[in-house]
Image (spheres, helix red, strand yellow):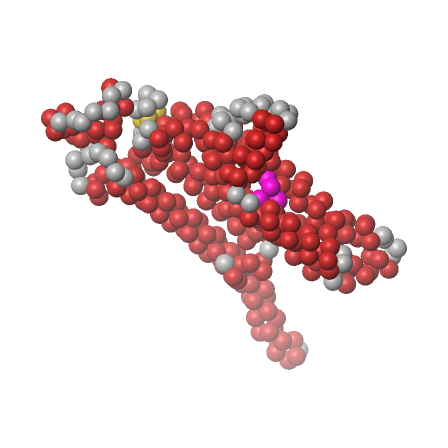
């Protein structure tokens, strides 16, 4: 009886510890998630602030630019002509007050009005976002299609072949998208005439822009897969699978590749945001509908409201996508919670 009595406090302590441990882990996870969200909000705020400051200090009087856009004439304006415009849009107010008004409008999804296109910026972006997003997704899928077979062919084999595969990936990752786009346009659209010179939203008009975005990304994804692939080839489960009679190709494809894809999946979160910003430049090269052409024209015409709207939207999507990927890995992999 005394032995049972003496062991009761120990059992009670163990029960309390077993209950407290999951609570502690949950609290730690929630704290890490909150930190990730707060960090994302801070980055978004910084992006909005920098965008406002850059557009505010650009050369040229904003009231004069608006009047010239409205009238279609590039002429000097008198102070009497500029005064009503400055008062209407708050250009004559202190910069801090202008910033607070700008930030408040963004919180209500009001990106302003495009005087060049005579439409709200939100409506313009909504029309052009789908072609850009479609191009980004097509490029991401194509990059995976390029990276996985190349890694399977060259990774984890003899040293020379592995070095050659890694070198090709490095070159691909370093190629400028603008240069790739012009080269593909000259060779396959103008020279061979396999694809239209002016891109469109149809399949043929999407191929060359998607390849342009996919080639550098395939280099990055290939590097991410290769490093983990070669480490996994040294693991005991490879020898175990071979001992059970599985072929080397089967081990590489069914076991090693599955482990090697994890870092590349993480990289894809960054890639989508990067592709959205890269698509802006590529669409301009191929004269393809989307945010690219709209942004280039907006910059040329000093349509500040449209420029800031597109920049902030792309930044927002980039931040949200990376936040979602971070949170998924934080929840799925407990090892990351202590390093968050």
In the rendered image, the vertical position of residue 272 relative to residue 76, given as above or below? below
- Residue 186, position in %: x, y? 57, 31
Q: Based on the displayed image, in which of its 4 quarters is residue 217 positioned?
A: top right
Question: Which of 179/137 is in front?
Answer: 179
Question: Which of 36/145 is in front?
Answer: 145
Question: Which of 278/92 is in front?
Answer: 278
In the rendered image, the vertical position of residue 136 relative to residue 34, given as above or below? above
Determine if the magenta segment contains residue 4: no
**Quadrant containing the N terminus in the rendered view:** bottom right
Q: Magenta span covers which residues?
A: 214-218
Of all residues, the one furthest to the bottom in this rendering is 2
- Residue 158, position in %: x, y? 76, 58
Q: Residue at x 69, y 60 (%)?
A: 231
Q: Is residue 334 left or right of residue 246?
A: left
In the rendered image, the vertical position of residue 316 relative to residue 225, given as above or below? above
In the rendered image, the vertical position of residue 216 relative to residue 186, given as above or below? below
Determine if the magenta segment contains residue 215: yes
- Residue 257, position in %: x, y? 72, 50
Question: Which of 18/29 is in front?
Answer: 29
Of all residues, the one furthest to the front in this rendering is 191
Q: Is residue 117 left or right of residue 78?
A: right
Number of marks in the rendered image: 0
Q: Residue at x 56, y 38 (%)?
A: 180
- Per the picture, the main secondary structure of the magenta-coloured stretch is helix
Of all residues, the one furthest to the right in this rendering is 245
Q: Could one spot residue 33 in this view of the protein? A: yes
Q: Could one spot residue 110 in this view of the protein? A: no
Of all residues, the one furthest to the left in this rendering is 80
């Amino acid at each position: 009886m005394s032995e049972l009595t003496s062991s009761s406090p120990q059992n009670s302590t163990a029960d309390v510890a077993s209950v407290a441990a999951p609570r502690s882990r949950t609290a730690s996870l929630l704290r890490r998630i909150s930190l990730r969200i707060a960090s994302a909000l801070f980055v978004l705020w910084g992006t909005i602030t920098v965008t406002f400051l850059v557009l505010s200090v650009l050369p040229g009087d904003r009231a004069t630019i608006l009047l010239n856009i409205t009238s279609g004439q590039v002429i000097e304006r008198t102070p009497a002509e500029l005064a009503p415009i400055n008062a209407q849009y708050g250009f004559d107010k202190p910069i801090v007050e202008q910033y607070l008004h700008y930030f408040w409008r963004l919180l209500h999804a009001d990106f302003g009005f495009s005087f060049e296109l005579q439409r709200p910026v939100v409506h313009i972006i909504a029309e052009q976002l789908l072609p850009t997003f479609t191009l980004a997704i097509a490029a991401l899928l194509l990059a995976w299609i390029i990276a996985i077979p190349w890694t399977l062919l060259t990774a984890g084999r003899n040293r020379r072949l592995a070095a050659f595969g890694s070198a090709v990936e490095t070159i691909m990752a370093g190629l400028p998208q603008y240069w790739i786009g012009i080269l593909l346009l000259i060779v396959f659209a103008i020279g061979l005439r396999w694809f239209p010179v002016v891109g469109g939203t149809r399949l043929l008009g999407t191929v060359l822009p998607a390849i342009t975005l996919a080639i550098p990304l395939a280099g990055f994804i290939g590097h991410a897969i290769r490093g983990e692939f070669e480490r996994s080839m040294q693991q005991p489960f490879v020898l175990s699978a071979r001992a059970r009679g599985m072929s080397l190709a089967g081990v590489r494809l069914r076991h090693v590749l599955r482990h090697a894809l994890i870092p590349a999946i993480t990289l894809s979160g960054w890639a989508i945001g990067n592709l959205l910003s890269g698509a802006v430049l590529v669409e301009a090269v191929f004269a393809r509908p989307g945010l690219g052409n709209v942004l280039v024209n907006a910059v040329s015409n000093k349509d500040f409201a449209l420029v800031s709207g597109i920049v902030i939207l792309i930044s927002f999507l980039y931040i949200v996508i990376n936040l979602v990927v971070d949170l998924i890995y934080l929840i799925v992999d407990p090892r990351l919670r202590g390093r968050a």
